[in-house]
Amino acid sequence: MSDPLVLIPARLAATRLPEKPLADIAGTPMIVHVWRRAVEAGIGPVVVCTDTAEIVQAVEAAGGLAVMTRPDHPSGSDRLAEALEVIDPEGRHDVVVNVQGDLPTIDPAAIAASVAPLADRAVDIATLCAVITRPEERTEPSVVKLVGSEIAPRRLRALYFTRATAPYGDGPLFHHIGLYAYRRRALARFVSLPPSPLEQREKLEQLRALEAGMRIDAVVVDDVPLGVDTPHDLERARAILAARRLN
């Protein structure tokens, strides 16, 4: 593999927390916190991809790189595909890591771990998961479960993703973390595919790849990063990062 390229899609349009990429956390916009975590991972260049000039300005003011993309993309994956051709038209980077722009508390080590499965040429996409420890999350539809087969310590081959409680029976359940490392050709293929039946039923984009026969492997990490979707989540993120500064 060549050095991965880390891309962070971000847009202002959010119904539950308007303009959340620019939300203040300890005097810094949230998107800048995410950019910093990705830089700290140390796996390759980091670029924010957005459709909003204010986000570009915030990232550049912090010393980062950002590019403008079209405002009409149906998903972050499509935004990444456009940005990739702008940033790296020569194809120097053959791995693209997609870090969601609402994960200001993510562990940089988790970002770095996401690329490891791609050392196996049979793997198209790599992702992350963590063992569910809170009982209520076992049945919560907003917690996406990864159903997989263990192929090595802390490594699963994904067989399915679901909002239901699965698999049945004794054993751990895995909380899927929506961070992806794509082979470049896998990303191009993925965004060229139409939405699949199970993707539409479960409202889970990654099922499109599985239904098309693409292989997704997952690294098991120790905890789930906080995704900021609501004002309550934002307050939790502020508290977490404030505690880290004190320690």
Image (tube, grey):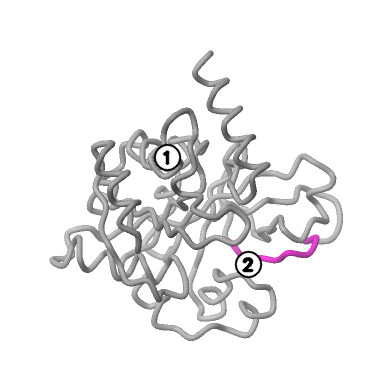
Tell me which corner region of the image, top left, top right, bottom left or bottom right, holds residue 202.
Answer: bottom right
Question: For the magenta stretch, what is the residue range?
Answer: 158-167
The residue located at (52%, 58%) in the rendering is 217
Q: How many marks?
A: 2
Pick whichever, 191 or 72, lies toward us. 72
Q: Is residue 159 magenta?
A: yes
Q: Which residue is mark 2?
A: 159
How far, Cα to Cα, is label 1 from label 2? 37 Å
Q: Residues within 10 Å of mark 1 (few under 14, many from 20)?
A: some
With respect to residue 46, does 124 lie above or below?
A: below
Identify the amino acid type marked 2. Answer: Leu
Residue at 39% over, 62% down: 182
Q: Nearer the viewer, mark 1 or mark 2?
A: 1
**Which amino acid type corresponds to the residue marked 1 in the rendered image?**
Pro
Nearest to N terminus: mark 1 or mark 2: 1
What is the number of the mark on residue 29?
1
Kindly identify the residue that appears in the image at 27 percent across and 52 percent down.
66
Q: Is residue 142 left or right of residue 76?
A: right
Among the 4 quarters of the image, the one containing residue 82 = bottom left
Check disc 2 and report its element: helix, strand or loop: strand
Q: Residue at x 73, y 64 (%)?
A: 163
Q: Position of residue 246 (x, y in %)?
A: 53, 14
